[in-house]
Image (tube, helix red, strand yellow):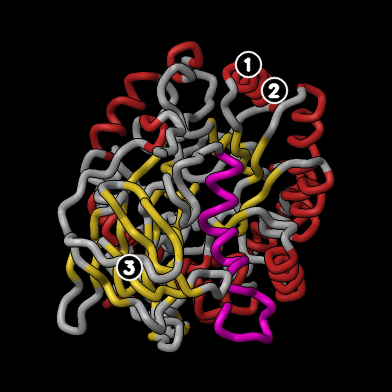
């Protein structure tokens, strides 16, 4: 297959030849072949996004999301690889739980990875020998699933993972820095007042100090404050930012209500802008969604009873592409490519993913950046049926390809999904085909 006259993220116009599962050639004026040609003049071609932080809820909570529904939503948003977190039921803390989740992941139409979890009951000598994407998110404070652990267990897990060459992803909040006075409130902002920005900074500091002592490499999940980002960067560790911490703040909670509750919570507008600046300037390594679907009925509760988390896997790349259309944001298409594809592949050592280059997997997304669409929950494919980004402008894909196979095409009448067997990215052993 030849994709002709596509504009890449860096602005170069190139033809891209796909042969089998991989990219065969990238250049100007490649000759057509018998396998067909896709005309992409005026469109942009991106490597598929690697979303290294999702919660697809199987096993345990299929009424919220399944691997089938979550992967379809991801494909419709230009995401070609997802990494599922361990706080399912049962939690992914031993070999049996990993194997069970991998069976559910077989329903995915895109590629995937599975992270292992750490609790007092984990079985590391078995878990760390499975084909894990990473260890974590390791919770330094309780979140959905009640998997918060103490410092001694965190350091023991960090040592074991480092010995096995497994990266540790950290959910960094220090519960000792939570503001208990906020518990007397019942407004939507109470959750942000309770789980303070200082709690994140303190936990990032503690995690980075432990990693430095052990010569380990950690990745800080869903950083929501400029302080946390800077602490990690100064320590030589990597960070991710979610689309909701990038684009939403506490000023939006009046409209969102409990649908805006997540961990870590939304921050003040000034901090949001400072986080955005660090995403633009390269301090932040990647964007990941923390896609955490709950039903409308579950979220429609008091601020203290509603579950934490928001969906985002289908809207993240479209939102970033819409931001990049506006020169005033400072966010470029090249930076979007690096945040969503190249950097995640580099940080987590997945060399076959992340770039449009010969020998890489043909994970490709074609978009028309001249057109935007308003996000509407009724048009999305996640099972939870709502979005915190209702009404935002977005640039959705024309089509999405995983390892050379078209898995999604956008149609004016009805979106089209194709049958495809997603694979564990670790099963490829980092192979880049010549």
Q: CA distance from mark 3 to mark 2?
A: 49 Å
Task: Point out the tag, 3 or 1, that comes first from the N-terminus.
Answer: 3
Label 3 CA crowd tier, 10 Å (few <14, some 14–19, many 20+): many
Label 2 CA crowd tier, 10 Å (few <14, some 14–19, many 20+): some
Residue 334, magenta (yes or no): yes
Per the picture, the main secondary structure of the magenta-coloured stretch is helix
Camera-side residue of 331 and 296 = 331
Q: In the picture, which quadrant includes the N terminus? A: bottom left
Residue 221 vs 94, above or below: the answer is: below
Q: Residue at x 50, y 40 (%)?
A: 351
Do the CB atoms of the residues marked 3 and 2 lie less than 8 Å apart? no
Task: Point out the tag, 3 or 2, that comes first from the N-terminus.
Answer: 3
Task: Point out the tag, 1 or 2, that comes first from the N-terminus.
Answer: 2
Instruction: Tell me, for residue 163, which label it has, or none.
Output: 1
Image location (x, y in percent) of residue 197: 74, 57
Residue 184: quadrant of the picture? bottom right
Q: CA distance from mark 1 to mark 2?
A: 12 Å
Q: Which residues are magenta?
A: 324-348
Image location (x, y in percent) of residue 152: 70, 21
- Please, what secondary structure does the residue beneath circle 3 have? strand
The residue tagged 3 is: 3
Residue 123 vs 359, above or below: the answer is: above
Residue 73 vs 249, above or below: the answer is: above
Camera-side residue of 431 and 304 = 431
The residue tagged 2 is: 155
Camera-side residue of 249 and 83 = 83
- On the rendered structure, is 66 left or right of 285? left
Residue 69: quadrant of the picture? bottom left
Residue 423: quadrant of the picture? top left
| Residue 203 visible within the image | no
Q: Residue at x 76, y 24 (%)?
A: 215
């Amino acid at each position: 297959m030849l994709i002709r006259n596509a504009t890449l993220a860096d602005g170069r116009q190139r033809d891209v030849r796909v042969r089998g599962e991989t990219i065969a050639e990238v250049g100007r004026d490649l000759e057509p072949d018998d396998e067909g040609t896709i005309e992409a003049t005026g469109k942009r071609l991106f490597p598929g996004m690697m979303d290294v932080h999702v919660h697809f809820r199987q096993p345990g909570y299929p009424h919220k999301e399944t691997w089938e529904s979550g992967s379809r939503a991801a494909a419709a948003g230009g995401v070609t690889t997802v990494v599922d977190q361990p706080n399912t039921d049962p939690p992914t803390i031993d070999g049996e739980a990993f194997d069970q989740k991998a069976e559910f992941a077989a329903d995915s139409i895109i590629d995937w990875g599975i992270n292992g979890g750490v609790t007092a009951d984990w079985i590391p000598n078995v878990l760390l020998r499975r084909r894990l994407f990473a260890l974590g998110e390791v919770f330094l404070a309780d979140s959905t699933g009640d998997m918060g652990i103490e410092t001694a267990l965190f350091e023991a897990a960090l040592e074991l993972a480092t010995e096995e060459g497994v990266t540790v992803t950290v959910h960094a909040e220090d519960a000792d820095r939570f503001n208990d006075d906020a518990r007397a409130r019942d407004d939507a902002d109470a959750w942000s007042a309770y789980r303070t920005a200082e709690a994140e900074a303190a936990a990032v500091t503690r995690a980075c100090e432990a990693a430095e002592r052990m010569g380990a490499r950690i990745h800080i999940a869903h950083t929501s404050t400029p302080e946390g980002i800077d602490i990690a960067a100064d320590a030589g560790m990597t960070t991710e930012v979610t689309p909701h911490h990038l684009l939403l703040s506490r000023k939006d909670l009046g409209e969102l209500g409990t649908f805006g509750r997540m961990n870590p919570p939304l921050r003040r507008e000034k901090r949001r802008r400072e986080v955005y600046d660090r995403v633009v300037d390269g301090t932040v390594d990647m964007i990941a969604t923390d896609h955490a679907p709950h039903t409308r009925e579950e979220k429609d509760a008091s601020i203290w009873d509603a579950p934490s988390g928001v969906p985002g896997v289908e809207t993240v790349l479209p939102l970033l592409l819409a931001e990049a259309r506006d020169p005033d944001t400072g966010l470029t298409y090249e930076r979007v490519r690096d945040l969503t594809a190249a950097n995640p592949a580099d940080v987590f050592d997945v060399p076959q993913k992340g770039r449009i280059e010969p020998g890489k997997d043909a994970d490709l997304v074609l978009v028309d950046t001249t057109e935007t669409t308003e996000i509407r929950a009724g048009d999305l494919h996640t099972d939870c049926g709502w979005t915190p980004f209702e009404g935002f402008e977005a640039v959705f894909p024309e089509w999405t390809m995983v390892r050379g196979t078209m898995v999604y095409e956008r149609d004016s009448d009805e979106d089209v999904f194709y049958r495809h067997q997603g694979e564990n990215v670790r099963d490829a052993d980092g192979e880049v085909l010549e």
